[in-house]
Image (tube, grey):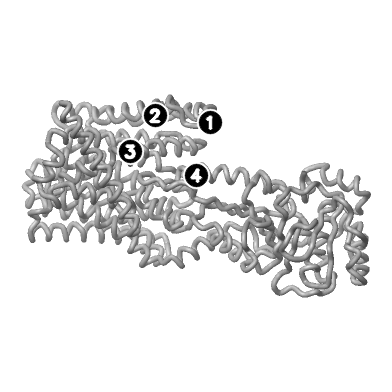
Amino acid sequence: MTAHDAGLLMLDLALILVLARVGGWLAQKVGQPPVVGEIIAGIALGPTIIGPHLSTVLVPVDIRIPLSALANVGLVLFMFIVGYELDHMLIRGRERIAVSVSIGSIILPCVLGIGLAFWLASRHGVAPDDRLPFVLFLGAAMSITAFPVLARILTDRGMQRTRLGGLALASAAVDDVIAWSLLAVVVTVAGSSADTSWHTLFVVVYIPLMFFLVRPLLRRLLPLHSRAGGLTPTVLAIVLVGLMLSAFAAEWLGVHVIFGAFLFGTVMPREGGETLRHDIMEKLEQVSVLLLLPVFFFTSGLKVDLRNIGLSGLGELALILVVAIVGKFVGAYLGARLQRVPDRQAFALATLMNTRGLTEIVILTVGLQLGILDQSLFSLMVVMAVVTTVMAGPMLSAFYSKRRIERDIAEAERASLGVEAARRVFAVVDDPSSQTADVDLAGALVGARRPAEVVLSRLLAYRKPALEVGTGLSGELAEMARSLEETERLAARVRRDDLPVPVLSRFSHDLERDLARQVTASEPDVVVVRAGAHALGDVVTGELVTVAAERPLMPSVVAVRWGTDADSVAALRVGALIAAARRVPLVIDEGAGRRAAAAVAELERRGLNVSVGAVPAGALVVAGGIAVGDGVQVAVRAAQDADTGPIADWIDLVGTAEPAGSAGSAGSAGSAGSAEPAVVTG
């Protein structure tokens, strides 16, 4: 390559990158995955839109050779990502439905594709000796589902945590494994020659070697990554060297480099390796998405030529679209209905399984390279891949509205709650490291009534742009694992045999809206929230307990500012529950009047040390209302239907406490062991 050619290569790379980013941005603006816009941008530089002359002027023939080499590297990285994103955890608990849907979505389009291939073979001059690989390849190509694009559609709509989203991910994962295995066999048959066919025999050695030797070796990367606290150049280099060697081995075996890359991705460590996976995905996306895949889209677009399609070609395209769409849709739908998936969910599942995207174009490119497809049929099949991907989002919205998705999310969160609780306390966790006091308070507010439960809610904001090629699920899994671990440590503080503590944790694009929906779905009796953190006043129908943002000292006494309104009655109830749980004295503000005497007598019968007087220094002060400050550390707003009835209406919540001793003994009793939940900690 001359210096002039090198300069042209840099210029063409810049042009390709700009068009790819603009195309991806425009696609997102109309609700499509970015990859759709990038594929169309690649086709735009080909002969179909700007003509062969201008296309050659912009990208001379000599420059296309190094571009094709870069595109092949991009393919290898992409197929590694596809294999790495597959996870058996996606399938766990959904095996029967996933297998049924995936088999249905493979067999029917494959059979229809084979039937169509016999008709297309004569029209495209396929020699009799080449017909078997041709018809098998076309049938297999019709069966592909683009797992990364499907996952992105789900995560953009927040559906990945719903039952439908889980089924779609599981079905697409099984579909990918079966379809890629089938394609590997077809490509091996089509690409073998008399000189290299003996290489194929070593496939029976290569595959077990990857699973039983390479996979255990790769697990040694986990402690290296953990000790370094992140992805080091050495760890990434080891992965890339292994990837390239696996791709080379597959090509030598006559299978094709993409299958070697896919297999290497599948043997990468999963369990305990979520953070490593996310770090690798982020690094590879910076190279793959920004540079190499746009080059692949361009080199593929150069081979798409629809200028002379004619009526005959339009007829072929129509049949290809019918076979691809109807075969995939009907097969997936019937597979779902056989497992008693509801009709509307089965329709939505079939729509999602019709997504083909970049994965289909990868397969078609392999078919073109091996001479299985000619340029005209390749062009028609690329159009099919784009159409089926573009239609998935709008069709899903038609079958499954945003309101129905929101209902599914709410149902999933309700299902994760432990029991149909007689009393439920809902605590909002924003920062587990500073909210032990809030959770302990929630545990105390359950009281003695059973059944009961404490629900801990932690929503995580999406902090980074979603991955454009990978599903993005690996990063979510890593962060979610950390979140659950931190929140579970809080839950363990108050969980007992008779008190379950379910944890609701997920990602959210709108924290306030989704938190409000969680509260509404949970129907809690009490909600505990940090002051100034969330505006839940209009959402909570039960008691709203607001805790001061600063961390209070461990109290030796609880004081209640009591009045005659419903908020003050609720404050007395909260104060009594805290005092009973902590076994500390309870002081009722001396301004409470005559009603305090009846309350004192009733609470003393329950074993509490109660008195009426001035608020002691250092006391944990509970008052009615929603505002903390001015000495108040816990504010209580009564439930919407609350009244100012007698203490006998709720005294059963307090139970029967052990007699409280002095302030000092009470404080030591509360910290003696983990059996007693601490209400506040210093």
Q: Is residue 475 visible?
A: yes
- In the picture of the structure, the residue carrying the numbered disc 2 is 239
- In the picture of the structure, the residue carrying the numbered disc 4 is 477
- In the picture of the structure, the residue carrying the numbered disc 1 is 229
- In the picture of the structure, the residue carrying the numbered disc 3 is 288
Give the x, y percent position of residue 598: 91, 69
The answer to whether the residue labelled 2 contacts the one labelled 3, judged by CB atoms less than 8 Å apart, is no
Q: In the depicted view, which residue is nearer to us: 114 or 42?
A: 42
Q: CA distance from mark 1 to mark 4?
A: 17 Å
Q: CA distance from mark 2 to mark 1?
A: 17 Å
- Mark earlier in primary sequence (2, 4): 2
Residue type of the residue flagged with mark 4: Leu
The answer to whether the residue labelled 4 contacts the one labelled 3, judged by CB atoms less than 8 Å apart, is no
- Mark earlier in primary sequence (4, 3): 3
Image quadrant where one finds the C terminus? top right
Q: Is residue 496 visible?
A: no
Is 394 on the left or on the right of 446, as rendered?
left
* Mark 4 surroundings: few (<14), some (14-19) or many (≥20) residues within 10 A: some
- Mark earlier in primary sequence (2, 3): 2
Residue type of the residue flagged with mark 3: Ser
Residue type of the residue flagged with mark 2: Val
Q: In the depicted view, which residue is nearer to us: 269 or 227?
A: 227
- Mark earlier in primary sequence (1, 3): 1
Q: CA distance from mark 1 to mark 3?
A: 24 Å
Is 175 on the left or on the right of 420, as rendered?
left
Nearer to us of marks 2 and 1 is 1
Helix, strand or loop at disc 1? loop
* Mark 3 surroundings: few (<14), some (14-19) or many (≥20) residues within 10 A: many
